[in-house]
Image (cartoon, grey):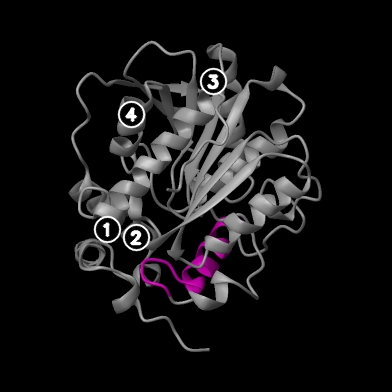
Amino acid sequence: MIQPDYRVLLDEEIWAYMDRSDSFYPPDAVSLTIDQQRAVYNRMCAAFHQPHPDGVRTWDVAFGGVPCRVYEADTSAITVVYYHGGGFVVGGLDSHDDVCAEISAATGYRVISVDYALAPEAVFPACFNDAWAAFQAIAAAYDGGIVLAGDSAGGNLAAAVAHIARGSHDGRIAGQVLIYPGLGGDRSKGSYITHANAPQLTVADMEFYQQVRSGGVPPVADPRYAPLHDTDFTDLPPTVILTVACDPLSSDGEAYAAAINGAGGQAHWHEAAGLVHGCLRARVMSRKAGAFFDQVTAAIGAVGAGQWPAISTG
């Protein structure tokens, strides 16, 4: 297969972002020790971190025994439970701190970021158990609707929580917004083949993270691990999946939306051209990434308000 020409597919702003990102977190980061990976990832996140919008209040508190950070820009009946990306190996409350603050400012919703346990110290299902425990405690602590959201690995956890939460919590989950999530799709086709060696995330990188997350033995047919491996896609909340074209994970969004819609639910998948995995961090360097982040916040706002369709791609 002819490899994509990323010099054509990606514009100068995205290349400038990738060059800066790579100067902190190199393309071969998976060859480093876990401690080294976390150190360079944390430095990269700190370098890109943006000041909080005016009026956003934050504090740290545990929910269900899991460290969390709360963001409030206004009094709101809607709570966004946000799970950060990082391959289940890196990331935490600081890595996506500005993203969560900006989501709160843009929507007016309360946002709670969940600092779930990372591998290899805590292999699956520890990450899901933390995600679930925090979700249950947050639902008990706050009335009103809940939007599940997350990027990459966090998108996986948000969807897994949605699957396990079906039939409970009196319909309080208003919806889920998943940002370039890894959902356990078919690696023999689609973007897994076309963009197997994409900048910022490769299929080989994904294999590394899967081995670390699972302790070497990935579970089979467990939707807590891979939501696309579920056999039942009924009764899931309204779902928006936002992916980017130059990313091996993009086909997961297409497959997940098709599964939910095929089961009679509501799901919308949108793939943004000219962007790479992890591009939330590029939102201040790239007009395309900024527009993508605006779609993320608009989708969260619409889902929380019960509006469908929840995204405009015009």
Which of labels 1 and 4 is toward the front? 4
Residue 40 is marked as 1
Q: Is residue 81 above or below residue 30?
A: above
> Is 94 on the left or on the right of 254, as rendered?
left
Prevailing secondary structure class for the magenta stretch in the rendered image? helix
Q: Residue drawn at (58%, 63%), measured in percent from left and top?
A: 251
Q: Are marks 1 and 2 in contact (CB under 8 Å)?
A: yes
> Compared to 173, does 238 lie above or below?
below
How many angstroms separate mark 1 from mark 2 (CA)? 5 Å
Q: Residue furthest toward the right?
A: 231
Tell me, for residue 37, which label it has, or none.
2
Q: Secondary structure at mark 1?
A: helix
How far is disc 3 from disc 1 in space, using C-alphas? 31 Å
Q: Residue furthest front?
A: 314
Please name the residue that numbered disc 4 is placed on: 106
Specify the segment rendered in magenta: 198-214
Is-magenta flag for residue 274?
A: no
Amino acid found under the numbered disc labelled 1: Val
Across and down, in percent, residue 233 comes to 76, 44
Mark 3 crowd level (few <14, some 14–19, many ≥20, 10 Å Cα): many
